[in-house]
Amino acid sequence: MKRVIFRAFGAMLLIVVMAGLIYGLELADSPQYDPNLNIAFVGTNDDADCIVLWQADFAMMIDTGEAVDADTILSFLEQNEIADLDYLVLTHPDKDHIGSATDIIRALKVSAVIQPYYQKENDRNKFLQARLNQSRVKVVVPTRVLHYTVNDMDIYVYPPLEKNYKEDNNYSLAVYIKHKDVSMLFPGDAQSKRLGELMQTDWGTVDLYKLPHHGRYHDRSVELFNLLSPTYTVVTAKEPSSELLEAGDAMGTQWFNTVGQTVLFYSDGQSIQWVDTQTI
């Protein structure tokens, strides 16, 4: 009887030890929680958007530049060991925002693509939508504000408020990210009508701002810029319009552009800092 009990106890002990070893291996393989956030505006050949935000256990991309930018974007992702995207946000279906999307989806594991309901009739977008239909990527088309919580981040995706606009750019999704005390706003290519919609939200001041529509001037663009009063402002072009440049200089924002160079920022949740500018 004692031998039976001893054998049963030994078997149970072996199971516990094996379970502990398996759990330990799983922990070793899993990325550790990373409280810091990296933000990169990947350099492009011309006026185009590609923004990557990542931690050890999370990554997302907002827009994918033009088709000609694919090699630069994929090289950047490889250098930073980013093989998975939790979210790929395509703010609107212009070629300078979705140009490399099919390359990204082919090369990386993408969990979800978030895009507006408006789908422009162009060859690049038709090819992309066909690719999405063939793949197993989840496609999300927001009709109200989306809110995701990841680690210490709150991610909000704001869809356009109307169904029809004269300017295609007004269908742009806007992405607002709060990393503890640090805030960032990426409004796609929003023009006057959409800028008015965005001004209905009380953003407060933000730490990092991507000028809408590559820094071109539109009614209310200066007004929104002044309300946000960002510490850092990125223009996805060689330079912003003279009106926005004057407004930014007056508020003391620090300027960056992304044509031909990648701009890197780092947030620890209390503050955000410019890290480096790398020529592509």
Image (spheres, rainbow, N blue to C red):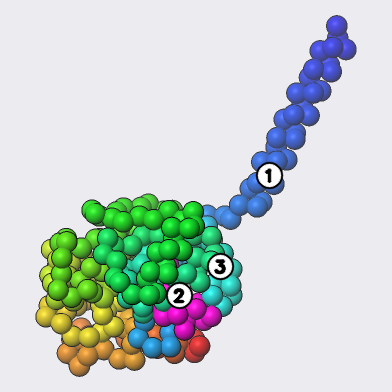
Res. 61 visible in picture: yes
Q: On screen, 222 above or below 272?
A: below
Q: Position of residue 130 (x, y in %)?
A: 43, 63
Give the secondary structure at mark 1: helix
Q: Is residue 69 magenta?
A: yes
Along the polypeptide, which appears first: circle 1 or circle 2? 1
Work out how far the residue at label 1 is from the one at label 2, CA to CA, in angstroms: 39 Å
Q: Which residue is mark 3?
A: 107
Q: On screen, 87 above or below 104?
A: above
Q: Which residue is mark 2?
A: 100
Q: Which residues are magenta?
A: 59-73
The reply to whether callout 3 and callout 2 are in contact (CB within 8 Å) is no
Along the polypeptide, which appears first: circle 1 or circle 3? 1
Work out how far the residue at label 3 is from the one at label 2, CA to CA, in angstroms: 11 Å
Give the secondary structure at mark 3: helix
How crowded pointer 3 is (Cα within 10 Å; few <14, some 14-19, many 20+) is rated as few
Along the polypeptide, which appears first: circle 3 or circle 2? 2
Q: Is residue 71 magenta?
A: yes
Q: Residue 260: name its quadrant.
A: bottom left
Q: Position of residue 4 (x, y in %)?
A: 84, 12
Residue 24: which disc? 1
